[in-house]
């Protein structure tokens, strides 16, 4: 498996084809990272005018970025109401994690006993960089690598439909993970990722399935606190 990409781009790139200008790409990365770092909270309204003023872009360029973010599951677009950071409700959250359990169990079935040494080494390198990002306090990179781990496993399993479904689910469920670390445990543990890789060395997938199920339960155990009533968009995007 090729070395995972850690450039400043999200784990779940949009499937919407576009030839993005450099300012568009910068806006996309900035908004994505602000969402992942919870500087932009779930439910926050994003206006085309406000974003255009910050980045010096016409509204149709801003709209193209918002469409990409919507394809990633991070932004909800509503006719006549504009764009908001996705805010999955309790029922949707339950449904998403339930679906992830099913899809990622299937990935475990396909990979158990079949993970090559090269693939295992590349995944462990990703976990090491995930751990390093957490220790350095680089939350956007840590979140991206944590999400990338699940997508890389799906890619190795070889089912393109599962990969596409998990891209959106992983991005959207990431919105639910609390920014607060309680009891000294990170919301999506790199140690649990390592346990999954260890379990995949066994030809019987039952252990790997159990490790992944436990990991996803841990990811789902904490939800975001309510968004603040007021915030500054420029500050959230690091443009103040």
Image: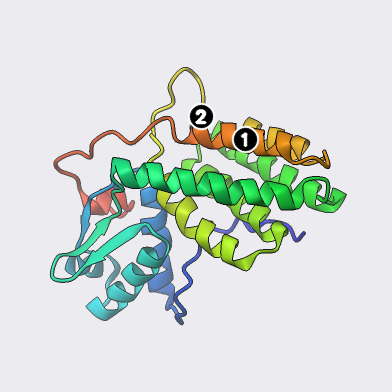
Looking at the image, what colour scheme do you see? rainbow
Query: What residue is pinned by disc 1?
Result: 190
Q: Identify the disc placed on residue 186.
A: 2
In front of the other: 101 or 16: 101
- Give residue 219's position: percent from left, percent from top: 49, 35
Query: Which residue shows up at 23% across the image and 77% down it?
Result: 59
- Give residue 1's position: percent from left, percent from top: 77, 59
Q: Is residue 162 above or below residue 44?
A: below
For residue 214, which quarter of the picture? top right
Q: Secondary structure at mark 2?
A: loop
In front of the other: 70 or 57: 70
- Give residue 139's position: percent from left, percent from top: 48, 41
Tell me if I can see residue 175 in this picture: no
The Cα–Cα distance between marks 1 and 2, rounded to whole angstroms, is 9 Å
In front of the other: 172 or 126: 172
Q: Is residue 148 above or below residue 124?
A: below
Query: Which residue shows up at 47% across the image and 44% down it?
Result: 98
Q: Is residue 227 above or below residue 153?
A: above
Q: Secondary structure at mark 1?
A: helix
Query: Which residue shows up at 38% across the image and 72% down it?
Result: 24
- Asked whether the residues under the numbered discs 1 and 2 touch, taking CB atoms below 8 Å apart as contact, a structural biologist would say yes
- Give residue 189's position: percent from left, percent from top: 57, 33
Q: Identify the disc placed on residue 15.
A: none
Residue 4 shown left or right of residue 43 in the figure:
right
């Amino acid at each position: 498996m090729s070395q995972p990409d850690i450039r400043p781009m999200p784990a779940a790139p949009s499937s919407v084809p576009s030839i993005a200008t450099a300012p568009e790409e910068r806006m996309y990365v900035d908004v994505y990272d602000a969402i992942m770092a919870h500087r932009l909270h779930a439910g926050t309204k994003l206006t085309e005018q406000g974003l255009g003023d910050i980045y010096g872009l016409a509204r149709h360029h801003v709209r193209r970025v918002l469409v990409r973010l919507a394809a990633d599951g991070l932004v909800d677009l509503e006719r006549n109401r504009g764009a908001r950071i996705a805010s999955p409700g309790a029922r949707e959250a339950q449904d998403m994690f339930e679906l992830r359990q099913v899809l990622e169990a299937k990935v475990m079935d396909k990979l158990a006993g079949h993970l090559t040494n090269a693939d295992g080494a590349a995944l462990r390198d990703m976990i090491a960089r995930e751990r390093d990002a957490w220790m350095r306090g680089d939350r956007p990179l840590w979140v991206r690598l944590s999400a990338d781990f699940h997508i890389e496993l799906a890619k190795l399993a070889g089912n393109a439909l599962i990969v596409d479904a998990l891209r959106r689910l992983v991005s959207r469920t990431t919105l639910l993970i609390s920014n607060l670390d309680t009891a000294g445990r990170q919301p999506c543990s790199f140690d649990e990722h390592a346990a999954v890789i260890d379990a995949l060395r066994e030809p019987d997938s039952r252990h790997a399935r159990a490790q992944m199920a436990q990991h996803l339960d841990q990811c789902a155990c904490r939800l975001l606190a309510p968004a603040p009533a007021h915030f500054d968009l420029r500050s959230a995007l690091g443009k103040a």
